[in-house]
Amino acid sequence: MTALIPIDADDPRGLQDALRRALDGGPALGFGMLAEPAVTVPDGTAAVIATSGSSGLPKRVVLSAEALRSSAEATAARIGSGRWLLALPAGYVAGLQVLVRSALAATEPVTLAGAFSPRGFTEATLSMVRTGDETLFTSLVPAQLATLLEAVDEPGVRAALRIYRAILVGGQALPEPLRERAGELGVRVVRTYGSTETSGGCVYDGVPLDTVGVRTIEGELQIAGPMLADGYLGDPALTSRAFVRDERGIRWYRTGDLGLVEDGVVRVHGRADNVIVSGGINVSLDRVERIVRRVPGLHQAVVVGVEDERWGEASVIVAARGELLRRSEPEQLAHARDEVAREVGKHARPSRLIVVDELATLPSGKPDRESIRRAVQDLR
């Protein structure tokens, strides 16, 4: 057994040294466990990371050094190696993988100081250029990319974005308008799909990395490969439900996402459990949200389900005030409802549009869906 050392993810430099030791068989790193008693983990473990908890209780995922290395090596094989900018919390798998990739490439990552901002991003990027680094990478969540695209006319932002060989964007679905806008500006965005249980993104622009297998069983996407987590700390029952072996002994992770694989391309339709029953009909909130986010002014809106006296459950759009176009809220809602009705049906139309000053987010940068849902429910 190996000791699990609680670690402060807010100190990337100290974390980088500890991570190198963990990857080489040293003490494993425990993220989000500073207040918990000391525990041990199986030999070979490099990190235990709590999932984001965006739609439920966080789970503590056990990741081996082999899994983290395999993920980083597969990424390098797909997009190349170079120097990375750390723009995400290092205590989440996407941020941690920036450090792992840096360690394997024998480079020092540059870390953004303070809260994420276009100015900070630009200054950090230019600092790498001034030191002679030519092959640059970073990893962002869609909200960060949107912030940068909105600021492309500010000094240096457009140039900084275009310097990167690849900007990985994951953590949640990337709205198509953001991807198109980035492409128009010459920004090389790579959409990633994965989770903490897969050591981060393992499908890039719909194509699995070279060591990754993806299949569907009854509509659910399942993933195999050397980057899979060992399981969940202290929860063997959950581990056995989430990780299964087929008749050949191959281990698969049940993602809980619905989707399909066509001609080697993975298409994700949404969470199997993010469904409401409205008027007796199942409605996928993920599907509704994807459609809503194509509506101008609602590119980063969140769709949640709430109790409804008439329909049992109904979907509600929640959007930040600063994003809305100069249209009335009823007009904006009507546009979104029309789009959803056209693609899914009238039964799936959102019932309301709620405008807030700022959307609640998790430290990972993802929307805090449970917090948003509770706040909406309390308004009723």
Image (cartoon, rainbow, N blue to C red):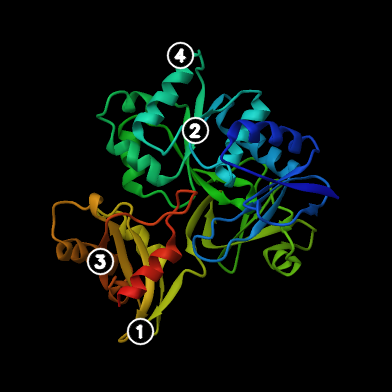
Residue matched to label 1: 279
Residue position marked by numbered label 2 in the rendering: 138
What residue did someone put label 4 on? 130
The residue located at (42%, 56%) in the rendering is 367
The residue under label 4 is which amino acid type?
Arg
Label 2's element? strand
Between discs 3 and 2, the one toward the N terminus: 2
Query: From where the camera sits, is residue 107 visible?
Result: yes
Task: Give the alpha-carbon distance from disc 2 to disc 1, as whole Å.
Answer: 44 Å
Local secondary structure at mark 1: loop
Q: Quadrant of residue 321?
A: bottom left
| Residue at 36%, 68% in the rendered image | 375
- Front position in the image: 213 or 165: 165
Q: Which residue is mark 3?
A: 353
Residue 296 can be seen in this image: no
Q: Amino acid at mark 3?
A: Leu
Sequence-first tag of 1 and 3: 1
